[in-house]
Amino acid sequence: DAGVTQSPTHLIKTRGQQVTLRCSPKSGHDTVSWYQQALGQGPQFIFQYYEEEERQRGNFPDRFSGHQFPNYSSELNVNALLLGDSALYLCASSLWLAGGWSYEQYFGPGTRLTVT
Amino acid sequence: RKEVEQDPGPFNVPEGATVAFNCTYSNSASQSFFWYRQDCRKEPKLLMSVYSSGNEDGRFTAQLNRASQYISLLIRDSKLSDSATYLCVVILKTSYDKVIFGPGTSLSVIP
């Protein structure tokens, strides 16, 4: 049973650059959520995708955007990188049910982004 | 006040001890609750959901107190492998499902 995969595992970028992170959900899952986790803190919800649409969004600026593909995989794009964007970016997959999404999430190993 | 707060930790306990973590939430409209564990430099993993009636999974027991707006996690007979950070998660249904992670409580089980 394929779990959640993310790429790359590590990334170093310079302020002002743009970055794209990738995620493939757990087999059988159709919903992908993205989180940012700064050192020593809990993950913060960025947004969620289902049926190739952004369904929910947390309190993050428009510099953070995403996409979901027909095979349910997803990308997170961050433009105009700031030093404060340095963090672990986690992707979580879940199922969308009749009444909404299943709150039980399975996380990928994350991408550690360093902005210098 | 933060939306979700947890015991600051770290907790250092001997093997075999019983340890309890608390998590408080500020919005009474919060509707779903979970505990995750996160090993150092790894991803969070779902430990258990928390139900109003309380629920148990082996050595782990989770409780929800809606009146006082807190959830708890009890670990009995601690093992070395229980060493991790424990994150509580609260889901608040607003115009969207707001997923809020607490800052986590670190546990070290000592031989």
Image: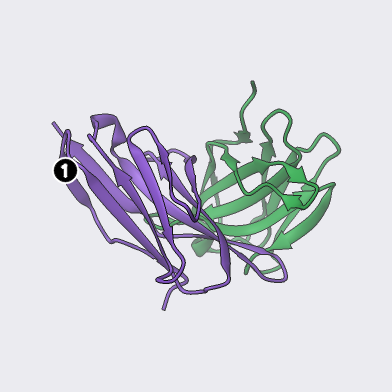
Chain colours: A green, B purple
Residue B9 placement (x, y as % from top left): 24, 56
Q: Which residue is more in the foreground, A68 or B53? A: B53
Q: Quadrant of the C terminus of chain B?
A: top left
Q: Is residue B97 left or right of residue B5?
A: right
Q: Is residue A40 left or right of residue B30?
A: left
Q: Is residue B42 left or right of residue A71?
A: left
Label 1 secondary element: strand
Which residue in the rendered view is the most extreme toward the bottom? B1
Image quadrant of residue B31?
Answer: bottom right
Task: State the residue position of label 1.
Answer: B13
Q: Image point 44% across, 38% down: which residue? A: B42
Residue B49 placement (x, y as % from top left): 51, 46
Which residue in the rendered view is the most extreme toward the front? B53
Q: Image point 82% across, 34% down: which residue? A: A71
Q: Which residue is more in the foreground, A43 or A96? A: A96
Image quadrant of residue B64?
Answer: bottom left
Q: Image point 58% across, 71% down: which residue? A: B29
Q: Quadrant of the N terminus of chain B?
A: bottom left
- Classify B45 as above or below A52: above
Q: Work out whether residue B105 can be spotted.
A: yes
Residue A75 placement (x, y as % from top left): 72, 45
Disc 1 marks a residue whose amino acid type is Val
Q: Classify 10 Å Cα crowding around label 1: few (below 14), some (14-19), many (20 and above).
A: some
Which residue in the rendered view is the most extreme toward the top? A1
Residue A13 placement (x, y as % from top left): 56, 50
Q: Is residue A68 left or right of residue B5?
A: right
Q: Which residue is more in the foreground, A6 or B74? A: B74
